[in-house]
Image: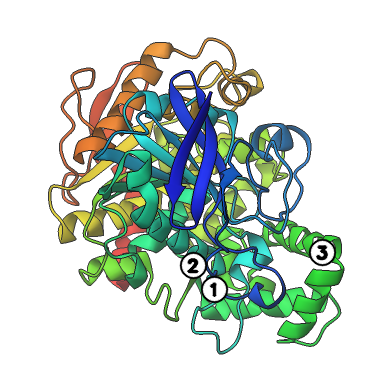
Amino acid sequence: MDAVASTTYGRVRGTVEDGVAVFRGVPYAAAPVGSLRFAPPVAPASWDGERDATAYGPAAPQIGLDGVAAEIFAPAFPSGEDCLSLNVWTPDLGGAGLPVLVWIHGGAFLFGGSGDDLLDRGAFARSGVVVVSVNYRLGLDGFLHVDGDPAGGNYGTLDQLAALRWVQENIAAFGGDPGRVTVGGESAGATAVCALLAAPAARGLFARAIAQSAYPEPLLSQASGAIMAREVARGLGLADGDLEGVRALREREPERVIAVVKSLFEQAATRDAERFGDEIAALMNPFMPLVGGAVVPRRPLEAARAGELADVDLLIGTNRDEFRLVFGLGMMAIDDEIVGAIFEATFPGQGAEALALYAETRPDASPVDLLAALETDRSYRVGSTLLADAHAAQRPGSTFFYRFSWESAAFDGAIGAAHAVELPFVFDALDTPMARALTGDGAPQALADDVHRAWVAFVVSGNPGHAGLPDWPAYDATTRPVLELAGEHRLLRDPDGRELALWVAPAAEAA
């Protein structure tokens, strides 16, 4: 059965699937090629008649993944240059005033796409929410530092802004309310959401935000961007700052450029601060939103502490064992022998004491388990907590923090409540191949019911609480209430606060 809607550029024809109208591959900007490469997005050309919107558009050009990581996270459809498209799921094409969730996919700003089997399950639409998922430029195409560019290299962020403006102009034609937009994402998608919170051009484009397993602190500085621009040029055999040379090679030899980007990603994972600088070494990620310039002038944490973050409701949180997915996928080689050295490098002069503190509440943990806890805090929990502290101070009563702690059976139970394991529960899609790869067998539907319902409640009202959960108070920086989502939900107050203090106190003093 067909479904037809009108956009500002022309009519689109999608399908109706199990009562949900679905439109795929709808362009929100022109293909970023030629003179539009390393430039802000521009509007797509209009069309006559009805444009077919039954298939996903290409994912952005990206590095390839290997092994199990590819099976879980690689897009299920081809990548290509004409990648600036979005998809819409709506429960009522003829309705009006429905809440809207705009979903920004994760993938380290290097891989991924706007369509997967979790989204295709359509659970949010069946729960009364219009869903929009967005492709945006990745890696070099999305976040190359260019000297003198007022955009600051944030072409991927500009793509997301263009998609949000498309939503403001068009979502009413799909039954949605442009005044009830929530922007959400996981991992890199959540970090993109945090950048949008600090982006002046995003003001008024959304009323709520969801950040699942974000790494918002620090985003990369322009100085770090310049380091990566230099490394890209060297990898391609070009002079530093030769943008036209990069552009020309990107046009003629895209595979070669992608190979250089992948190599730099792998090298950044070695945390070579002497080569890449402290920020890239800490994040192990060479391409992501850049602070400075007109798009993201200040770090999200700085903007929040100055009272300049977007005036929106915020649902934010992390998974208990985020980093164990990295070890489970074999993306970082590690052994017990160097764990103490990493703790000492992280907390100079008190590494042994910090290691003992992490071990105190994990009596059966191996050294690698303790390292995973350390890296979970470094990469995800600390930045999310600091941002929640500042957002709650700027906008009291509107911040809600969760910790997802259900332990996956995947990877022979080795990953626990790892990065991305919450996604099948959020999207109520436990019966999909991607979900089974992340959760293993036996994932509890009751937990998916509770988590999905909480996210829907937040999108609808700004408060994720519901009758199936314990009381979930708004977050504040003094008591730090965190709702643990697991087999048995419970409210925690400043969970693992002594460990967090190792990180937060020095950061607060430096602010």
Q: CA distance from mark 2 to mark 3?
A: 22 Å
Q: CA distance from mark 1 to mark 3?
A: 20 Å
* Vertical order, 3 against 102 (above or below): above
Question: In the displayed structure, does residue 370 sit left or right of residue 37?
Answer: left
Question: Where's the C terminus, which quadrant?
Answer: bottom left
Task: Confirm or deny contact between disc 1 and disc 2 (CB under 8 A).
Answer: yes
284 or 501, nearer to the observer = 284
Q: CA distance from mark 1 to mark 2?
A: 6 Å
Tell me the crowding category of disc 2: few under 14, some 14 to 19, or many 20 or more residues within 10 angstroms, Cα based.
many
Question: In the displayed structure, does residue 11 sit left or right of residue 483?
Answer: right
408 or 188, nearer to the observer = 188
Of discs 1 and 3, which sits in the foreground? Answer: 1
Circle nearer the N terminus (2, 3): 2
Q: Position of residue 191 (x, y in %)?
A: 45, 55
What residue does disc 1 label? 40
Tell me the crowding category of disc 1: few under 14, some 14 to 19, or many 20 or more residues within 10 angstroms, Cα based.
some
Question: In the displayed structure, does residue 10 sit left or right of residue 492?
Answer: right
Asked whether residue 353 appears in the rendered view, the answer is no
Q: Position of residue 371 (x, y in %)?
A: 56, 43
What residue does disc 2 label? 158
What residue does disc 3 label? 254
Circle nearer the N terminus (1, 3): 1
Q: Residue at x 43, y 63 (%)?
A: 161
Most extreme residue toward the left, as rendered?
A: 396
Which secondary structure, mark 1? loop
